[in-house]
Amino acid sequence: MPQLVREQHVDVFVGYHAFALQESDDAFLDLEFPDEFNFGTFLSTHPGRLDITSAGHTHTASLTVEVWDGPAPVQDSAAWEEQAEADFESVSGQVAVWSMSLGRLDDLITLADSGGLWRVRVSSAGRADVKALAESEESIKGVERYLVQFWPADS
């Protein structure tokens, strides 16, 4: 049975409906965020990059990242408004969080001590609520929530 290796919580500033998780070693990347971002897709990928489209324009989302030693347990789809899976390669074992409006944020996510190939599942809830609040002038924090689960692709 797969075991949870690491869990990290990060507040992500979402700007223009978007944020990304990107390989920390920028020299590895052909395209850096936000180049060729696809606003029509919940989760899209480029080598070393996971682009995530939010339901809210400008707000702070809650992000929980889990790293597993094998396939992460499947999440109950009734608890999430969006879910998608993809492959991800990291050369450093570190992932940076990027905001469309602020660029690279200070938080780093550790996947492993070195690079490797990963499978990732992204789940999101609170999308309808954050979309409804988008017209308000209030500061929106933690309404939209994300769970991102990584596990080794060869497990």
Image (tube, grey):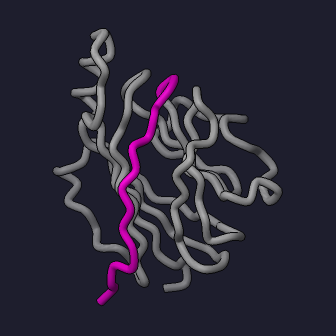
Position of the N terminus, as image quadrant, is bottom left
Which residue occupies the extreme bottom position in the image?
Answer: 1
Q: Position of residue 107 (x, y in %)?
A: 52, 52
Residue drawn at the location 18% of the way across and 50% of the way down: 79
Instruction: Name the one closer to the observer, 149 or 38.
Output: 149
Q: Please, is residue 58 above or below residue 48 in the view?
A: above
Instruction: Name the one closer to the observer, 133 or 117.
Output: 133
Please give left or right for residue 137 compared with residue 86 in the image: left
Q: Quarter of the image holding residue 108?
A: bottom right
Residue drawn at the location 33% of the way across and 84% of the way down: 3
Q: Position of residue 116 (x, y in %)?
A: 64, 76
Q: How many marks?
A: 0
Q: Quarter of the image holding residue 20?
A: top right
Q: Which residues are magenta?
A: 1-17
Q: Quarter of the image holding residue 39?
A: top right
Residue drawn at the location 60% of the way across and 34% of the way down: 38
Q: Please, is residue 81 above or below residue 85 in the view?
A: above
